[in-house]
Amino acid sequence: MTRTVIRGGLVITASDEIHADVLIEDGRIAALAASGTPAAAAFTAERSEMGAPPPEGWGRTIDATGKYVIPGGVDAHTHMELPFGGTYASDTFETGTRAAAWGGTTTIVDFAVQSVGHTLREGLDAWHAKAEGNCAIDYAFHMIVSDVNAETLKEMDLLVEEGVTSFKQFMAYPGVFYSDDGRILRAMQRSAENGGLIMMHAENGIAIDVLVEQALARGETDPRYHGEVRKALLEAEATHRAIKLAQVAGAPLYVVHVSAQEAVAELARARDEGLNVFGETCPQYLFLSTDNLAEPDFEGAKYVCSTPLRPKEHQAALWRGLRTNDLQVVSTDHCPFCFVGQKELGRGDFSKIPNGLPGVENRMDLLHQAVVDGHISRRRWIEIACATPARMFGLYPKKGTIAPGADADVVIYDPHAEQVMSAETHHMNVDYSAYEGRRTTGRVETVLSRGEPVITEREFTGHAGHGVYTPRSTCQYLN
């Protein structure tokens, strides 16, 4: 048996804040006790027999005085090694999960991809092969469904049974991931039966392609036009349409990377009607804007992602949605491409810039900055970054909380440490930071994954292969 005691910290979960000591045994949370009480003191009592010394490795004490003790983050939207636009996302499962750990995230849910003409199983097996033995933290998979047919629908049932319980569809990217309304409806009908959750990239890709063609014909080729053609109204229209299709199918819906205030309004309206409709946003939409896309000398290409960055006035609606629970989750959509050699593929044609931003290492710190700035409370920080994504995707209470029986995925967080985000100091395998020069308050100090130290006082002490694949139950907001 291995035992770790975390002493003296402020334990923060989605529901509670308590000064407590945390006892970890064999990779799980064994108990919590108010700091300074006899119960807490008993955590370090030796259980050796006949006066013999305790076994080696029996006890480790971490002093968390003046620090937060929080659940490891659950990032429910990452794309490691994703093929896109003739290239691949620059983070592998090894580099990406290491960077996630540095940022206080201990579980990712990545997207396995079904290619058109292939089965779901082929896509899932390919992603298992990429991840197995390479991850520093635990991982799970969603399934991107690109080719809805009779066999695909049957496979969806089988995947739900084995713990892949969410399926992503795209209203964007015609010719790549795009599904028309009929295919979307069929998949939603199937998920209504098998308990799966449809995740939707809600943008009207058919209309966007027309606007792209027209912009390029006018000579509008710079990165800023990526944001201008992917109009907020076309995100709102697709969000509305996805909601109505889900309503017809009697299925729940999770809309990914919501960026526009008009789309938030569609989600709020649906939730007011009592529909099982959920929304996610990402740090880039909360902290960045079209001002970044408009940076000169092609620098704006660093910020090309879809849905795109919006004008700053959209940010207030996103923060409000997070406070009112019309948006429930903040994930990263981490999909990094290096500026040199990858983003540069779109010089002279914004439509050829690979879509995606690095962020898996920054999410927990940026959201803590939102606590400092008064946008959200500490418990809401943990709720949107840890507990709700775990519940949404069937990982709770194994992940997302600090409670007896939960995996000992625990972060010791220094709320007073200051840092400056930079590509020079981050651990993501990408040559720029989307938040270069941004000053934030709060920093990860130590990270445990299933009780094992992955980051120890700002040093990486984990290893590839520690992270294990984690099957999921169905969405816990529908049970």
Image (tube, rainbow, N blue to C red):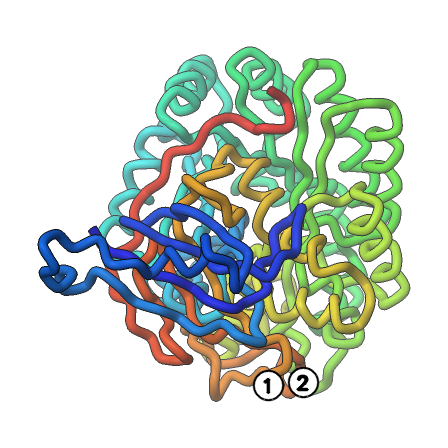
The answer to whether the residues at label 1 and label 2 have Cβ atoms under 8 Å apart is: yes
Say which of 258 and 184 sits in front. 258
* SS state under label 2: strand
Instruction: Give the quarter of the image for residue 246.
Output: top right
Q: Quadrant of the C terminus?
A: top right
* Residue 153 located left or right of residue 18: left
**Identity of the residue drawn at 73% across and 30% down:** 277
Amino acid type, callout 1 = Gln
Q: Residue at x 70, y 72 (%)?
A: 369
> Disc 1 designates what residue?
419
Asked if residue 466 is positioned above or below residue 302 in the image, the reply reads above
| Residue 14 position (above or below residue 245) | below
The Cα–Cα distance between marks 1 and 2, rounded to whole angstroms, is 6 Å
Marks 1 and 2, the one that precedes in the sequence: 1
Above or below residue 234? Residue 192 is above
Residue at screen point 57% across, 20% down: 187
Question: How busy is the neighbourhood of tag 2: few (under 14 within 10 Å), some, or many (20 plus)?
Answer: some
State left or right for residue 347 relative to residue 379: left
The three-letter code of the residue at mark 2 reads Arg
Circle 2 is placed at which residue position?
439
